[in-house]
Image: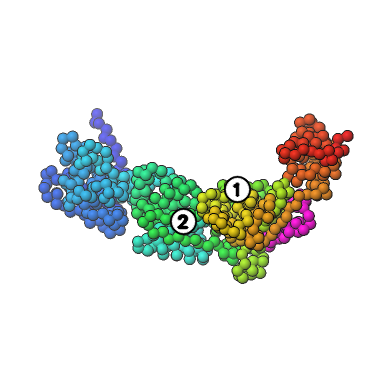
Amino acid sequence: MKPVKPVKPVKAVKAVNADRAAHGLAPLLAAARTWIEGAGDDPDALTVPVPEPARGTLVARLRDRFGLSPFELAVVACAAAVELVPGFGARCAQAQGAGGTATFTPGLAIARLPGPDWSALQPDATLRRWRLLQCAPGDVYAGRSLVLPEAVLHFLLGRAAMDERLASRLRVVGTAGELTPSRQEAVRRVAGIMGESPAPHVQLVTPTAERERSLLAAVAARQGRVLWELPAWALPEGAEEREDFMWTCARDARLADALLMVDVSATSDPGRLALATDFLARLPDAAAVCGPEVLRPPGRTVVSLSLPRLGHDEATQVWRKALHGAEDAAQVDVAVLSAQFQLDADGIATAARAARHRAPGESAAAAVWQACRLLARATLDDLAQRIDADAPWDRLALPEEELRTLHAVAAQVRHRARVFHAWGLSAHGHRGGTSAIFSGPSGTGKTMAAEVLATDLGLDLYRIDLSSVVSKYIGETEKNLRRVFDAAEESGAILLFDEADALFGKRTEVKDSHDRHANIEVSYLLQRMEVYQGLAILTTNLRKNIDDAFLRRIQFVVEFPFPDAQMRERIWRGIFPPQMPLENVDPSHLARLAVAGGNIKNIARNAAYLAAGEDRPLGMPHLLDAARREYAKLGQALTAAEIRGWVR
């Protein structure tokens, strides 16, 4: 019986051979066989020159992109032949003599290839520095294996590949959609800068890469490239590992015609920013950078650009196009959306989808408005505390004058689009921000008023504790504030800066550098409040702590007085929900407690728990017990006059 012959992978062999011919590798592989296999029998084989790659082939692209010499190209060819030419490794072992390995080595390169150049095989030379060739460990350098990295081999065969370490850290960004005219102009501007020789790094100063990702993808497409996004958190921490990662990244980017975008917007860690700066300083090719912190890698030119957001009119047109065809789209006030939410074209397109996929009975306007709020929460939620506001106007117990001022604040935010854009006030240099100071003792309703405004306007409310934002390090407070305002710009959320006394003070006299720096911090905060396209509120317990010069830059000042007996009775009458069981609760008696609204809320809540624990309706005894606890917390004692007639 005849032995069965093994089946050859005919299709695979033919495919590889076709790739070799189509991509210019075949002549080099044939020459490699002559140099190694024929040299022992034919001395003339040593003089066979390195074939000139055909123009446009992958081999020619590899040579031109890395500036390879004929000898370096021959080394690459021999390392590829070990992988692709059957029996080539065995010939290499035979050529090395006794103890030889089936690999290509530095010794063979110098002995068998035309135009030998020992320096081309050194660690800092092109082949090894750019990770086009790897030199395996070994005791004798001349006998160490020279290996072609997988990504380079796949490139030569016309199959794009990325190093495994990069694949888990990099993201390939898809092509950009249709851009607005202003963004198209920005693409031309950035592409022009990156087309200079030598090309600098270009940093787009932006709070988040989301804003500029599509623009940079368009820049890359304009240059015939793709965009690779590398977040700063993915950079290796070790210097040696980071160096290897950087050269591998640069190599694969050249092989793939990729523009590298380093995203530093997702981190404020100084250590991470330092790693990114070092990475950019060493990166051999120009890259794009996105982030709020302007980086200055030593020895490298960086062009920093702050590109404007979509203008109001342009954003309005984008909204109309995105909503076209949606049911009830005509009911959506795109001018108000454009004024309130500073979204880019991608964000607008995402929010507009909500009009087509809304809940039954929900209007298109409500669905889109809510989608806009949700889009902007991701970045701001990391920087501030979001308060779920659900408070109506009748929850506020304030004098009529203060209530009228709060209604004026709401009107200014609500009608900003009409006044600034439809009526043209923005063209006369007026800034669009709305700012207010809520002043009064603790518990008098400052935060509640902000919740009422957020509920009435349908906006998110974020609380920022200024005492935690202020830093003793020069410049850090401004950075913290900038991150908050930048993140809030898209949403137009209401920003409630609590504990403003931590930053403001009487500073008419500058006695030392600390006073001067504090003035700078206050001025920066007020400047950002003036240009912020939403509502920014400062709360303070002591208005007298705020200098009059600073106060004049605030549009609204609302005083929250300590409630008198009549106001306290009003608060008590509205503090209990209709469904709460009450028994002989007398608001006129409760109003004798000389406490603010916040303390009243605490007493009512604690009394409700006491009543629930006894499985009884809430009565005056429960409120008396809760009041004693609240007074003890305040370091006070109930007087006989305050509780006279409470319990009969």
| x and y, in percent, of residue 267 in the image | 49, 48
Is residue 67 among what the camera can see?
A: yes
Quarter in which the C terminus is drawn: top right
Q: State the residue at coordinates (64%, 66%).
A: 420
Q: Residues within 10 Å of mark 1 (few under 14, many from 20)?
A: some
The disc at residue 9 is none
Q: Residue 457 falls in which quadrant of the image?
A: bottom right
Residue 202 vs residue 170, the one in the foreground: 202
Does 38 appear above or below 216? Answer: above
Q: Nearer the viewer, mark 1 or mark 2?
A: 1
Q: Which element carries disc 2, helix, strand or loop?
A: loop
| x and y, in percent, of residue 166 in the image | 40, 46
Q: Is residue 398 magenta?
A: yes
Which comes sooner in the sequence, label 1 or label 2?
Answer: 2
Q: Gap between marks 1 and 2, in whole Å?
A: 26 Å
| x and y, in percent, of residue 585 in the image | 84, 39
Q: State the residue at coordinates (63%, 60%).
A: 550
Q: Residue 356 falls in which quadrant of the image?
A: bottom right
Q: Is residue 40 left or right of residue 440?
A: left
Residue 232 vs residue 398, the one in the foreground: 398
User: Would you say the residues marked 1 and 2 are in contact, meaning their CB atoms lie under 8 Å apart?
Assistant: no
Label 1 sits on what residue type? Answer: Ser
Q: How is the image coloured?
A: rainbow
Is residue 226 among what the camera can see?
A: no
The disc at residue 467 is 1
Q: Residues within 10 Å of mark 2 (few under 14, many from 20)?
A: some
Q: Is residue 157 left or right of residue 171?
A: left
| x and y, in percent, of residue 232 in the image | 45, 48
Q: Identify residue for label 2.
A: 294
Magenta region: which residues?
391-415
